[in-house]
Image (tube, helix red, strand yellow):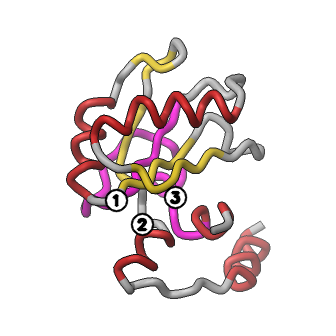
Amino acid sequence: MATDEVMASVAPAGGGSGALETAAVPVSTLYCSNIDWKVKKQVLRRSLHALFSRHGKILEIVTLRRDGLRGQTWVIFEDVTAATAALNAENGFSFFGRPLKVSYAKEKSDRVAKMDGTFVPKDRREKRRKRDAES
């Protein structure tokens, strides 16, 4: 699965502000921010996996290095209870010298939606047109 597919449906809680907020409905995808973006991608993924895997099975960790997405990551758990346990335990954890901010993702990830049969493909061109019209 392409990371662009995951990113299309997973956004930080609070409409992209990156502020620590909890979504109204818990989902199995966690949005993590305030991560030192100088950490190498593979080291970051391994460290996140070690940190979060004790709370439940992780399906995927999405870390992107594009501008505007540095210092952020999405951790996709198999179920909501594991995500909730990880959110409660790891929020504020000192991660590479910075307090980790953890919240539920705005929406369910594409990978989880495909597993439970609720996946609806999104038209990326429509999203791009809206963004260009606002600019």
* Among the 4 quarters of the image, the one containing residue 35: top right
> How far across and down, in percent of the image, does residue 11 sit?
52, 58
Sequence-first tag of 1 and 3: 3
Quadrant for the N terminus, please. Answer: bottom right
| In front of the other: 113 or 78 | 78
> How far across and down, in percent of the image, does residue 65 sit?
74, 42
Near mark 2 (Cα within 10 A), the count class, few <14, some 14-19 or many ≥20, is many
Q: How far apart are labels 3 and 2 at the CA level?
A: 7 Å
Q: Which mark is residue 78?
A: 1
Is residue 69 highlighted in magenta? no
| Image height of 121 relative to 18, above or below | below
Q: Dot 2 lies on which element?
A: loop
Say what amino acid the circle numbered 3 marks. Ala
Q: Is residue 17 left or right of residue 50?
A: right
Sequence-first tag of 3 and 2: 3
Quadrant for the C terminus, please. Answer: bottom right
Is the C-beta separation of discs 3 and 2 under 8 Å?
yes
Say what amino acid the circle numbered 1 marks. Glu
> How far across and down, in percent of the image, does residue 97 sit?
52, 12
Near mark 3 (Cα within 10 A), the count class, few <14, some 14-19 or many ≥20, is many
Sequence-first tag of 2 and 1: 1
Q: Which residues are magenta?
A: 8-34
Say what amino acid the circle numbered 2 marks. Glu
Q: Which mark is residue 107?
A: 2
Q: Dot 3 lies on which element?
A: loop
Q: What secondary structure prevails in the magenta region?
A: loop
Is the C-beta separation of discs 2 and 1 under 8 Å?
no
Q: Which mark is residue 11?
A: 3
Is the C-beta separation of discs 1 and 3 under 8 Å?
no
Q: Dot 1 lies on which element?
A: loop
Report the residue at 46% width, 83% height from top. 119
